[in-house]
Amino acid sequence: MLPGYGDQRGFELLVEAGFAVPQAIQIVTSNGADALGISHEVGRITPGLAADLVVLEGDLTDDPSIIRNVRLVFKDGVGFDPAALIADVEGQVGDR
Protein backbone atom coordinates (compact mmCIF):
# COMPACT_ATOMS: atom_id res chain seq x y z
CA MET A 1 0.00 0.00 0.00
CA LEU A 2 1.02 3.59 -0.47
CA PRO A 3 2.31 5.47 2.56
CA GLY A 4 -0.45 7.37 4.30
CA TYR A 5 -3.26 4.85 3.90
CA GLY A 6 -2.12 2.96 6.99
CA ASP A 7 -2.09 6.22 8.93
CA GLN A 8 -5.62 6.98 7.79
CA ARG A 9 -6.83 3.56 8.93
CA GLY A 10 -4.94 3.90 12.20
CA PHE A 11 -6.77 7.17 12.86
CA GLU A 12 -10.12 5.51 12.12
CA LEU A 13 -9.30 2.61 14.45
CA LEU A 14 -8.44 5.00 17.28
CA VAL A 15 -11.82 6.70 16.88
CA GLU A 16 -13.57 3.30 16.67
CA ALA A 17 -11.80 2.37 19.92
CA GLY A 18 -13.41 5.34 21.64
CA PHE A 19 -10.92 8.18 21.35
CA ALA A 20 -12.38 11.57 20.46
CA VAL A 21 -11.24 12.94 17.09
CA PRO A 22 -8.92 15.58 18.64
CA GLN A 23 -7.33 12.87 20.81
CA ALA A 24 -6.83 10.58 17.80
CA ILE A 25 -5.19 13.41 15.85
CA GLN A 26 -2.84 14.08 18.76
CA ILE A 27 -1.97 10.39 19.06
CA VAL A 28 -1.03 10.04 15.39
CA THR A 29 0.87 13.33 15.22
CA SER A 30 2.48 14.78 18.34
CA ASN A 31 2.40 11.59 20.42
CA GLY A 32 3.97 9.70 17.52
CA ALA A 33 6.74 12.28 17.21
CA ASP A 34 7.31 12.14 20.98
CA ALA A 35 7.57 8.33 20.88
CA LEU A 36 10.09 8.52 18.04
CA GLY A 37 12.12 11.20 19.81
CA ILE A 38 11.66 13.71 17.00
CA SER A 39 9.13 16.10 18.55
CA HIS A 40 11.76 18.86 18.40
CA GLU A 41 11.45 18.61 14.58
CA VAL A 42 7.88 17.51 13.77
CA GLY A 43 4.53 16.52 15.23
CA ARG A 44 2.90 19.88 15.82
CA ILE A 45 1.93 22.92 13.79
CA THR A 46 4.35 25.25 15.52
CA PRO A 47 6.76 27.89 14.20
CA GLY A 48 10.17 26.33 13.67
CA LEU A 49 8.90 22.77 13.19
CA ALA A 50 8.52 20.99 9.85
CA ALA A 51 4.90 20.23 9.01
CA ASP A 52 3.47 18.39 6.03
CA LEU A 53 -0.28 18.95 5.93
CA VAL A 54 -3.40 17.67 4.21
CA VAL A 55 -6.62 19.50 3.42
CA LEU A 56 -9.67 17.31 3.87
CA GLU A 57 -13.16 17.78 2.47
CA GLY A 58 -15.67 17.39 5.28
CA ASP A 59 -15.79 17.44 9.05
CA LEU A 60 -13.83 14.75 10.86
CA THR A 61 -15.88 15.24 14.01
CA ASP A 62 -19.03 14.25 12.12
CA ASP A 63 -17.50 11.34 10.23
CA PRO A 64 -13.99 10.00 10.89
CA SER A 65 -13.91 8.37 7.42
CA ILE A 66 -13.50 11.94 6.09
CA ILE A 67 -9.79 11.28 6.75
CA ARG A 68 -9.87 9.59 3.32
CA ASN A 69 -11.25 12.69 1.52
CA VAL A 70 -7.87 14.30 0.88
CA ARG A 71 -8.13 17.27 -1.47
CA LEU A 72 -4.63 18.80 -1.15
CA VAL A 73 -1.31 17.62 0.21
CA PHE A 74 1.35 20.10 1.35
CA LYS A 75 4.93 18.85 1.48
CA ASP A 76 7.77 21.26 2.21
CA GLY A 77 5.38 24.17 1.63
CA VAL A 78 4.30 23.05 -1.86
CA GLY A 79 0.73 21.97 -2.57
CA PHE A 80 0.04 18.79 -4.54
CA ASP A 81 -3.06 17.19 -6.04
CA PRO A 82 -3.39 13.77 -4.34
CA ALA A 83 -5.02 12.19 -7.41
CA ALA A 84 -2.03 13.22 -9.53
CA LEU A 85 0.38 11.84 -6.93
CA ILE A 86 -1.39 8.48 -6.92
CA ALA A 87 -1.59 8.39 -10.72
CA ASP A 88 2.14 9.12 -10.93
CA VAL A 89 3.06 5.97 -8.99
CA GLU A 90 0.33 3.67 -10.29
CA GLY A 91 1.74 0.25 -11.03
CA GLN A 92 4.95 1.00 -9.12
CA VAL A 93 3.79 0.86 -5.50
CA GLY A 94 1.09 -1.06 -3.64
CA ASP A 95 -1.95 -2.70 -5.11
CA ARG A 96 -3.89 0.31 -6.42
Image: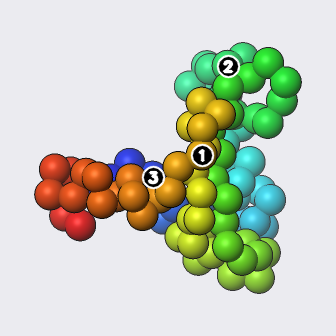
> Which residue is found at the position 48% from the left and 65% from the top?
9
Q: Position of residue 47 (x, y in %)?
A: 85, 24
Of badges 1 and 3, nearer the viewer stands: 1
Q: Secondary structure at mark 3?
A: loop
Closer to the chain start, of discs 2 and 3, is 3
Closer to the chain start, of discs 1 and 3, is 3
Closer to the chain start, of discs 2 and 1, is 2
Cβ atoms at labels 2 and 1 below 8 Å apart? no
Residue that numbered label 2 is attached to: 41
The answer to whether residue 80 is above or below residue 40 is below
Residue that numbered label 3 is attached to: 4
> Which residue is found at the position 67% from the left and 73% from the top?
57
The answer to whether residue 15 is above or below residue 78 is below
Residue 17 in view (yes/no): no
> Which residue is found at the position 60% from the left and 38% from the top?
78
Q: Position of residue 70 (x, y in %)?
A: 57, 65
- Residue 79 shows which numbered tag? 1
